Amino acid sequence: MEVLERIKSINPRIIYVLILVVIAIPLIKPFGLPMMVMQPSKDFYDVVESLKPGARVMISWDYGAGSDVELDPIAKSLLIHLVKKGAKIYATSSIPDGPMFAERSLKVLESLNQQYGSDYVNLGFFAGGESGIAAWAENFESVFRTDWRKTPAAQIPMMEGIKSAKDFDLIVTLNTGPGGYGTPDVWVRQIYVAKNVPLAMGVTAIMGPQTMPYLQSHQIAGLLVGLRSAAEYEALLRAPGIATAQMDAQSAAHTVILILIILGNLGHLADKKHRRKTSK
């Protein structure tokens, strides 16, 4: 009982250090805690897994700073999966700073012996939001005349034969949501509805409820929502990464906080009991 009473007098700095340590350990060495893989993540995985060698996949990095914590891990796992399937990767973005995040993600391909221009390309930013998507979906060359490095499209081997959105086997948007650019509803209208091209999405956690109806109506083939889905994707690939580490850290921190709440309440009850005794 004395121990519980002392809990109330613990220096808050000790708790802060404890939480810091609990978060840091799994980030350095992930635990790999068991995780149930939800069906949307499995659907996304299956769509990519069904691709044949040489399949053409466009990925649009429709996010900027602030959303990269959730969407960068999805991008990395997706790129690794596509390389395993032997797909050709076409990166783009409807957001001006998106190509920089694409370029950062694409660096993982260098370590996988992928050649720029033959296996992957960064086409950079396209303006216009929905009208821009509609334009290249109908006539690819009218929008993408060069890549992000200003190399003419005609000089890039993997650009041969790309005339419209229908020349892609799968299009994926990694999307941060509202902002006047290529939002999820825009991609559904211009890619799936207008061109009947398979479409998948990776979105931030807050966008999950808004995009889930597209999956339920089969307008998108797969959906990854936030860090949890990124960790599930890593589990399916059997390649634990930063998302797994962050989920472990989050789970560990929540466990410690829950224990502290329980101990705090027990200490409070012990204190009340002690006061009742001394007041008699």
Image (cartoon, rainbow, N blue to C red):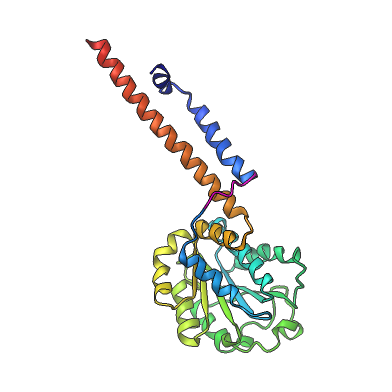
Residue for point 55% across, 32% down:
17
Q: For the C terminus, which image quadrant? A: top left
Percent of width and height locating residue 115: 77, 73
Task: Find out whether residue 31 is within the magenta segment.
Answer: yes
Is 262 drawn above or below residue 88 in the view shown? above
Where the N terminus falls, by quadrant? top left
Read off the magenta span: 29-34
In percent of width and height, residue 77 lies at 62, 63
Decide if residue 33 is in sight here.
Answer: yes
- Residue 202 seen in the figure: no
The rendered magenta stretch, by its main secondary structure, is classed as loop
Disc tally is 0
In the shown orientation, is residue 115 left or right of residue 201?
Answer: right
| Residue 43 in picture, x, y percent from top left | 50, 70
Q: Position of residue 100 (x, y in %)?
A: 65, 64
* Image height of 66 relative to 48, above or below: above
Please name the residue shown 58% across and 73% down the image: 48
Q: Nearer the viewer, residue 263 or 90?
A: 263
Residue 120 image-quadrant placement: bottom right
Residue at 59 percent across and 73 percent down: it is 49
Residue 193, image quadrant: bottom left
Which is nearer the eye, 55 or 171? 55
**Residue at 57% from the left image edge and 62% from the top image edge:** 236
Q: Residue furthest left?
A: 280
